[in-house]
Amino acid sequence: MTNLSDEEIYALLFKTLANKDRLKIINSVSDKSKTVTQICKDTGFEQTWVSHSLKLLKNNRMVEARREGKYIYYKLDNAIKPIIATAAKIAPKYKIRGD
């Protein structure tokens, strides 16, 4: 594995979080564990997109997965919760434009 600087790690973290659809998935699993089907219902996204996003989030240790029988339940990793909570708190202070 490549040794990354702190700044490179931060950039990867924020790059992963910089997608509004992934943030909807993160919000869906922030309070309780859910299956892909439940996340699809919450977000309105197709199963392939949710599965792809969860794989990325899991690989980057932002969500945890546990198997129960034939189902896999996903939940937000506790280390990421303060980051999401802080973003939700400070975001309204900024008038960010998309142009």
Image: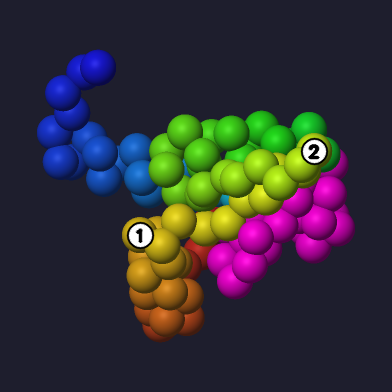
Q: Which mark is residue 69?
A: none
Q: Residue at x 51, y 64 (%)?
A: 97
Q: In the drawing, does residue 56 fall left or right of residue 87?
A: right
Provide the secondary structure element on which disc 1 rests: loop
Between 53 and 99, which is closer to the camera in this rendering? Answer: 53
Quadrant hosting residue 69: top right
Between 87 and 74, which is closer to the camera in this rendering? Answer: 74
Image x and y of residue 23, in percent? 58, 57
Image x and y of residue 89, in percent? 42, 81
Between 12 and 75, which is closer to the camera in this rendering? Answer: 75
- Residue with the mark numbered 2: 70
Residue 33: say if magenta.
yes
Image x and y of residue 29, in percent? 63, 61
User: CB under 8 Å between callouts 1 and 2?
Assistant: no
- Residue bounds of the magenta highlight: 24-46
- Residue with the mark numbered 1: 79
* Quadrant holding the N terminus: top left
Q: Residues within 10 Å of mark 1 (few under 14, many from 20)?
A: few
Amino acid on which disc 1 is placed: Ala
Q: Residues within 10 Å of mark 2 (few under 14, many from 20)?
A: few
**In the image, which is nearer the foreground, mark 1 or mark 2?**
2
Q: Residue at x 67, y 50 (%)?
A: 73
The reply to whether residue 22 is in sight is: yes
Cα–Cα span, label 1 and label 2: 27 Å
Q: Earlier in the sequence, mark 1 or mark 2?
A: 2
Amino acid on which disc 2 is placed: Lys
